[in-house]
Image (cartoon, helix red, strand yellow):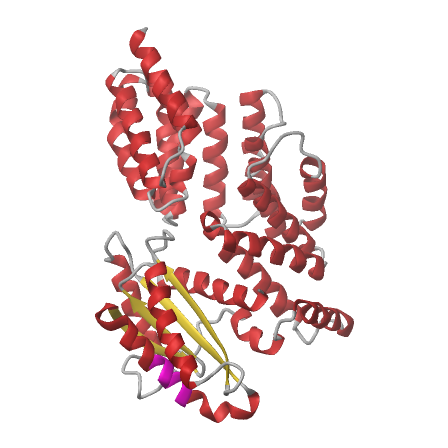
Amino acid sequence: MKEQLRIEDEISEYKTKQFASIEQQYEQFQTIVHECIHQEKFEQLIQFINAEIEPFLFSTLNNEVLDLMITIEPIIKEKYQENVATIYLIMGHCFYFYMDFEDARNYYKLAMSYAMEYKQFGVLSSSLKKYNASMIETRIDSVLWESSKYPSIFWVKNKGAACNKDFLVCIIAHIELSLKLEKNEYAYQIYNKYFEQIPFELTPRFKLKLESLKGDILNSLNKYNEALTLYHKLLKICINEVCYRDLIVGLYERISVISQKINDAQLPLEIQQSYDQYFKQLHIDKEYLQKHLAMATSNLNFVDSSFPMSYDQFINEVNELLNNASLEGLSLVIVDIKIREDDRQLENEILYCINEKLQDAFGDRRLLNTRIDETTIGYLVRKSELGTEVLSGRAFHEVRKLYPKEESPLAAIYFAAVNNAENNLTTYEQCRKLAYAYIYYEFYK
């Protein structure tokens, strides 16, 4: 009994302690996990993991979580098999949030198998929900849509009631798939039924998820300005909360899609005029902004002899280096400029100046650089985001001495640095999207 109390006391202290960093918190989490196993307190272990694992799955500690689950899986399978489904579920999450959907599906299927055998309906619900979510990448049809109803059914069977955050998460997945299949009115009805009045407190992240979903529904019903207003509000919140970086790209992509749709010449003139008025209210240079909203990979064949590496070469080599990056990661840097309309002939001169100052500032930390298009250059730097911002700030200070903001052709410099390790990203495209989301936010501010 004494040992059990000690474990319970450690868990209680963990839940109330203020940690200096997520790394320090994970270290204590890991210690408690191993102590539970050492004392064979498996029931406390599963309860503790279920309650406390989430923040680590959304952090750069994702791989460490996977290693821990791989270590304890054979022990749980031997000693406490009726709950090994929980371990497989978490392993599936680790792969899912790293966007390795094939391996994620394999572990979700394992989790479902054991959960069904031991009637672990909560785990069965979560596994099926995430499995369905991963399948959306490869298949969207009526069979998958019908399957997306079952996670919420299993959850009610597990808890006996629908008034629960996890139940609502299951319904969200069903609504998202309904929107993909253009069952828009149905999605609107389901949202109103379950989400307009929720009788319990929600976490900030979950509130953002729900509001984003409402924006998706408004968009599906062609209520573009309402959707854009909501997306912009959420984007501002997410940019200022670094723990919501994974939501930033999704919101930015939604804004991009709506903007492209509204600018379609086939749309009624009154919708386009309404959209133009909306951007005037935000004080955004709409014409220049379209370049970023398009989210194109730009001209892969753009050539500038002053930059020895073409853009497509740059992308390939960045991906190779990101695959072999150290724990500190590498930072993708995107720099874009806006030249006053009457001085467009000076684009090259100013861009070359910025490139020279940045290369001097980065020094031997610069690994690669390229010219992306007429007004944009990109770099890969061996430095943290904050460190890269400091070095870049020095370079821009030197540039502004030569081209003062109000007295030169250089109207604006737009900049973003995205470190792959800090953001748990694995490819150039993922880093690029987040960088352009940051640049877009600079317009919106």
In the image: residue 331, left or right of residue 195: left
Going 31% across and 88% down the picture, which residue do you hit? 305
Which residue is farthest top?
1
Of the pair 237 and 92, the residue shown nearer to us: 237
Query: Is residue 443 visible to the viewer in this orientation of the structure?
Result: yes
- Secondary structure mostly taken by the magenta-highlighted segment of the chain: helix
Residue 140: within the magenta?
A: no
Which residue is farthest left?
364
Of the pair 70 and 357, the residue shown nearer to us: 357
**Number of residue marks:** 0
Question: Could you tell me residue 362's position as x and y percent?
Answer: 28, 71
Question: Could you tell me residue 220's position as x and y percent?
Answer: 67, 55
Question: Could you tell me residue 243's position as x and y percent?
Answer: 45, 47
Query: Is residue 137 visible to the viewer in this orientation of the structure?
Result: no
In the image: residue 325, left or right of residue 17: left
Q: Quadrant of residue 89?
A: top left
Q: Quadrant of residue 264?
A: bottom right
Q: Quadrant location of the C terminus?
A: bottom right
In the image: residue 3, left or right of residue 269: left
Question: Could you tell me residue 35's position as x and y percent?
Answer: 27, 21
Which residue is farthest front?
401
Q: Quadrant of residue 186?
A: top right
Of the pair 127 and 195, the residue shown nearer to us: 195
432 up-or-down from 210: above or below: below
- The stretch in magenta equals 349-355
Going 26% across and 15% down the picture, which residue do you hit? 39
Going 30% across and 26% down the picture, which residue do you hit? 33
443 up-or-down from 310: above or below: above
Q: Quadrant location of the N terminus?
A: top left
Going 49% across and 67% down the picture, which residue do you hit? 439
